[in-house]
Image (cartoon, rainbow, N blue to C red):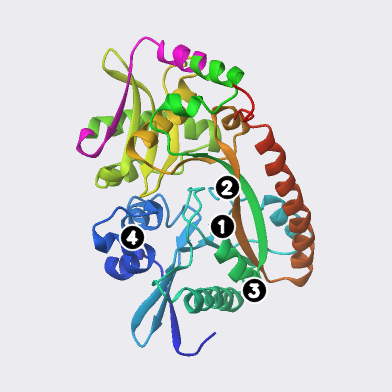
Amino acid sequence: MDQSVEITLHSDISEISESDWNACACPELAQGLRAYDPFTTHRFLAALEASGSVGPGTGWDARHLVAKVEGRVIGVAPLYVKSHSQGEYVFDHGWADAFERAGGRYYPKLQCAVPFTPVAGRRLLVLPGLEEAGRRALLAGMAQIAEGAGVSSVHMTFCTQPEMEAAADAGWLPRIGQQFHWINRDYTSFDDFLAELSSRKRKALRKERARAQAFGGQIISLTGDDIRPEHWDAFWTFYQDTGSRKWGRPYLTRAFFDALHEMREDVLLVLALRDGTPIAGALNLIGREALFGRYWGCIEDHPYLHFELCYHQAVDWAIAQGLQRVEAGAQGEHKLARGYLPVATYSAHWIAHPGLRRAIADYLEAERTAVDEDIEILTEMGPFRNLKEP
């Protein structure tokens, strides 16, 4: 690592000034623009810590990196000491199990990520114009910290492709995954989007939306000051139900949603109401170019209501706002029929033990080939019509 770069570790993001962090993570804020990535803003990460969603007892202990040159912050990275592999969505449970069965100790490890957030974005947050040097410094800093602490590994997940490639140049192992994103091809309405689907898929989605909207109430979309504290009370109930079924216990605390209320201009809350009472909802965060679907829940089951609130209403809103895409979270091939196509996601992994590193490298090489083939096949299976079809 360049000796002129000083790397420091911080166990609480409040130790890093918001202006220094955001100058690296989202410099567009200084121009009065919305952040491209709301998840790496200082206030979002601070909300996770202040609410107790991460920190002591959660298995996510902050060790955020700061890179300075002559006292000036040139780069930062969200970094955590992990005692488990939950809430990451880039799965390494098999690696941990194999290493520990062989007598190794996989945990603790380091995770460069946004907790509980399978959204792709920059992880090596560097001042504009200093990307190459800043990335090198932050990657080298993570590896040096890992070696000094004797941890098994460092994982930079849901990073950008250039960051993965920079890490691979530094000796990290590249990994490719996939998600399903909806892309706005300059549509002016949902019907414009439907017109690009095969006739069979188009009819199926219209029928699906009609059935969902016939649940006996109304669907509303709220953002900014239209979101009131009682809406968070309802959504907390939804979130607890979904979290208990999917993860055993919800990752986020009730206090986090109170903190999210303070950044409600970056939130889209889609609610299904019966007699004015919310019975289901979907939570999205708004970026400058994309809408990011995050959580869903309900207290009543109705056919297709999940798809309507999470996917179709998101597309409606993105079109109305001129956003370029909707990212609906991890996994889910059911999204394909609803116009969400597979895209590659990227990660990079630093592995200390030579034997474990060789085994993982072989696995990732085969996995990359399989993911590439899967993306190609799923894209061909997508709902968009052949151009020759009327």
**Circle 1 SS class:** strand
Residue at the (47%, 24%) spot, across then down: 306
The amino acid type, in three-letter code, at marker 3 is Asp
- In the image, which disc is placed on residue 169? 3
Q: Are marks 4 and 1 in contact (CB under 8 Å)?
A: no
* Figure check: 161 above or below 215: below
- In the image, which disc is placed on residue 157? 1
The amino acid type, in three-letter code, at marker 1 is Thr
Crowd class of label 1 (few under 14; some 14 to 19; many from 20; radius 10 Å): many
| Total numbered badges shown on the rendered structure | 4
In the image: residue 341, left or right of residue 306: right
Q: Are marks 4 and 2 in contact (CB under 8 Å)?
A: no
Crowd class of label 2 (few under 14; some 14 to 19; many from 20; radius 10 Å): some
Crowd class of label 3 (few under 14; some 14 to 19; many from 20; radius 10 Å): few
Q: CA distance from mark 4 to mark 1?
A: 19 Å
Residue at the (60%, 23%) spot, across then down: 198
Q: Of callouts 4 and 2, which one flags the residue occurring earlier in the amino acid sequence?
A: 4
**Circle 4 SS class:** helix
As drawn, the residue found furthest toward the bottom would be 3
- In the image, which disc is placed on residue 42? 4
Q: CA distance from mark 1 to mark 3?
A: 16 Å
Q: Which residues are magenta?
A: 207-226
Q: Are marks 4 and 3 in contact (CB under 8 Å)?
A: no
Q: CA distance from mark 3 to mark 2?
A: 24 Å
Question: For the residues carrying marks 3 and 2, which lies nearer the camera in this image?
Answer: 3
Q: Of callouts 3 and 2, which one flags the residue occurring earlier in the amino acid sequence?
A: 2
